[in-house]
Image: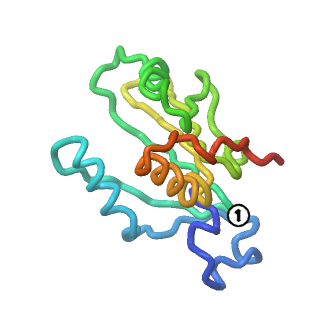
């Protein structure tokens, strides 16, 4: 689910507050503009073609992206929580939430943070991963600064250690 700002600053009747307020709708159902790059990145990691089903939804909020991802587990004994905590332990801008805690978009507003919650509902062979970012920071300017820091050999966190804006 994406905030109205994900569509850019251009004026559009469909993105007016009066049109999106008190509503929740799918868009890009026939094919979203970012689907090819997501499949390409996943195929690069998997070493084989990957096909996703991706249907984003518009939230009546100004900023934020909430992604809920589903996967079939190949190993039913895997401890998803421990796996995610180990994998992201040294990542300064990824926060894996405690077990049974799930991310909320307001908790990253104005910050270069990705918050992740993982679950295995009913202990079945399915993983559910929920992640949230502020699309105007982590999804845009913050990501650009983070990459610039790496490119110029600066500390990855330089200029980016600001707390989220609450409320």
Q: Is residue 4 left or right of residue 120?
A: right
Q: Decide: is 81 above or below 130.
A: above
- Give me the residue at 57% from left, 66% from top: 6
Q: Is residue 57 above or below residue 83?
A: below
Q: How many marks?
A: 1
Compare residues 36 and 70 and report the one nearer the observer: 36
Is 5 displayed left or right of 140 in the figure? right
> Along the line of sight, which residue is nearer the eye, 2 or 134?
134
User: Label 1, on which residue?
Assistant: 62
**Colour scheme of the rendered structure:** rainbow
Location of the N terminus by quadrant is bottom right
Give residue 67's position: percent from left, percent from top: 52, 48
- Give the residue at x 29% y 51%: 41
Residue 69 drawn at (x, y percent): 45, 43
Left of 166 or right of it: where is 15?
A: left
In the rendered view, tell whether residue 119 sits above or below residue 50: above
Q: Residue at x 65, y 61 (%)?
A: 59
Residue closest to the far left: 48
Which of these two is toward me, 65 or 100? 65
Residue sitting farthest toward the top: 77
> Which is more toward the observer, 31 or 8?
8
Q: Residue furthest right?
A: 167
Judge the density around disc 1: few (<14), some (14-19), many (≥20) Cα neighbours within 10 Å.
some
Q: Secondary structure at mark 1?
A: loop
Snapshot quadrant of residue 95: top right
**Whole-percent x and y of residue 113?**
60, 43
Q: Tell me where residue 85 appears, x and y as whole percent.
A: 49, 22
Q: Residue at x 61, y 60 (%)?
A: 136
């Amino acid at each position: 689910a994406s905030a109205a700002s994900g569509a850019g600053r251009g004026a559009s009747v469909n993105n007016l507050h009066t049109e999106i307020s008190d509503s929740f709708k799918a868009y890009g159902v026939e094919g979203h503009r970012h689907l090819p790059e997501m499949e390409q990145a996943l195929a690069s990691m998997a070493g084989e073609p990957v096909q996703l089903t991706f249907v984003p939804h518009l939230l009546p909020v100004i900023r934020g992206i909430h992604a809920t991802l589903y996967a079939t587990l190949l190993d039913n004994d895997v401890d998803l929580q421990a796996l995610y905590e180990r994998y992201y332990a040294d990542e300064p801008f990824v926060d894996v939430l405690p077990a049974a805690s799930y991310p909320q978009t307001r908790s990253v507003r104005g910050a270069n943070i990705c918050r992740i919650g993982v679950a295995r509902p009913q202990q079945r062979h399915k993983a559910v991963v929920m992640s949230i970012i502020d699309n105007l920071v982590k999804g845009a300017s913050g990501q650009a600064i983070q990459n610039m820091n790496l490119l110029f050999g600066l500390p990855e966190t330089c200029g980016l250690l600001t707390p989220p804006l609450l409320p």
